[in-house]
Amino acid sequence: MALSPAEIAARNAGFPMPEGGDRISDGDDAIRALGVTAHNREYNRPPLTTADRLDSLTKTGNYPIPSVAVADAIGSPFSAMGGVRVEQSGWSGANGPILRQTVWSYTQTYSMTRTRLSNGLFGSWDAGILRPDLGTMVGNTMRLSRWLANNPAVYTGGRGAVAFTIDHGLTKFKAAGLPGVFAGYGWGYGLALNDSTLASAENNGASTADILSWAGAEIWNHGYNHAATGNEQTAKTIVVQGKTALEARFGREVFGFIPAGVGPTGLAGFDGGSKPEMFATTLAGQMILEHHAVTTGYMGTGGVRNLDGTVQQGIGRFTMDALTVSRIKLQIDQAINDRVGIMFMVHPTQLDVGSNLTTAGLLEVLAYARTRQQAGELAVLSPGELVRADAGLTPSDASTLPVRVSDLERNTGTRKITTATGDLYVYREGTRVEVDFQNFRPIGPGDQTIVALPQGFRPVRTAYGNAVEGSTPRGVRAFFYSPWNVQALGIAAADSWVHGSLKFTTADPWPTTLPGTPA
């Protein structure tokens, strides 16, 4: 039996012909295979070279971009390996076909598209469809789950928490005796390090052996160097090599990343992780997540994070370098009052520079946090502990739960205390106190002590509030309390009255006898 045209085509294409059976069907399959082969041969173009240019690609098809060098040479919007898809969508006569070019890379989670219109010119690149990077998602999920499994849960017993990170500057950090301060307090802390700068004068005052001997020191990847780059592959190297180099140097796993503050866009558009999409749509962000269990960033305000046991990636830190001691203490107070976590950061090289925070000031801040910790008001954790901390109660607290809940919920109700110079209203719930003054008449102008606070309602530190003077208010006067006393500042006249309010935290034991009368 003579072969059919389809069978002849199949045989010429190298398909074996069966001795029997439905040879026509086999031939039709071969024809379809030939069509696919021809289509692939026509549509899948050879890889581009550095001699090619995107503006010159007019034939439909897929063009591989085999290297970063080729991507940069041809004018790709991505400095990365990937490909170009060219599609013809119409004809415009003398200017040739209307073209659409779509460029994608192996590293980005989105493509870029532009169109050559009837005038023969290409428009600007537009962001295309987002595509999730499964390697990043799976890599971070696996690292995070393993890290959490190897590190126990951290409970603060209902308290807010702070942590401290030291950004390089190890020479001054050591010379100031700060490793011993942290060790003496029993605190862990973070060291944000660039491996390539550890031999610099900023850091070489502390050896690898020194760092390994510092109790509580966590090593965090700060990037291989402290430089910005617009090149994706360089950004990837900074992230990945930074981690592997630190691990090789210190012989321990580096689980966390702290982005360096470099501008204007940081690591090839990563911008320090200022928005969630920076971790998804930039190569640096993807590599940070893929190679680390946890990372900070520049999201949020004041370094505040919820303490619910959930790791929140990309939350920022509170930088102390240029701030006063009193301002930093207020941030510690916020952690206490709002029961949140705050990660503080300082550059040792910036201490004692101009009007910056001094070394003595930093020691005062640490001592303040220690005092609040010892008062049972604050938890001080390492950065690795803070990111997974839970402000709830531990399972072992179950036996004391009724007592603890009673302490937290117990309140005095509003109590009115009448004095010779005015009425004082106090209210306490747990450790929080509210004080109101009505119709207090100071004995003279100037700064005056108005009233002494009763036991059980006394503050743990000096703070400020607002007051109004005069039956026709003459303006707002600030007043503060020093321990046990409330003072009004700048009273204009002895016969005017002063009214105001204060809110603060007390460490006093619960009053055995409530003052005054119910209000």
Image (tube, rainbow, N blue to C red):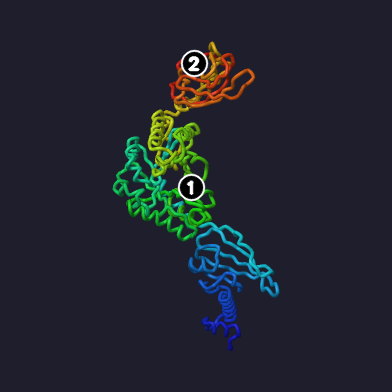
As drawn, the residue found furthest toward the top would be 420
Q: Is residue 132 above or below residue 30?
A: above
Q: Residues within 10 Å of mark 2 (few under 14, many from 20)?
A: some
Which structural element holds mark 2? loop
**Which quarter of the figure has residue 13?**
bottom right
Q: Nearer the viewer, residue 458 or 142?
A: 458
Q: Earlier in the sequence, mark 2 or mark 1?
A: 1
Q: Give the spatial CA distance, label 2 vs label 1.
A: 48 Å
Residue at x 43%, y 56% (from the top left corner) = 238
Q: Quadrant of the C terminus?
A: top right
- x then y, percent, for residue 464: 51, 26
Residue 159 in sight here: no
Q: Nearer the viewer, residue 480 or 187?
A: 480
**Which quarter of the figure has residue 359?**
top left
Q: Name the kind of residue labelled 1 in the image.
A: Gly
Q: Could you tell whether 182 is left or right of 81 in the image?
A: left
Q: Is residue 371 above or below residue 100?
A: above
- x then y, percent, for residue 78: 53, 62
Q: Name the kind of residue labelled 2 in the image.
A: Leu
Q: Nearer the viewer, residue 90 or 274?
A: 274
As drawn, the residue found furthest toward the front would be 354
- Residue at label 1? 297
Q: Quadrant of the N terminus?
A: bottom right
Which structural element holds mark 1? loop
Res. 514 mark: 2
Q: Is residue 309 above or below residue 511?
A: below
- x then y, percent, for residue 15: 52, 81
As drawn, the residue found furthest toward the right would be 93
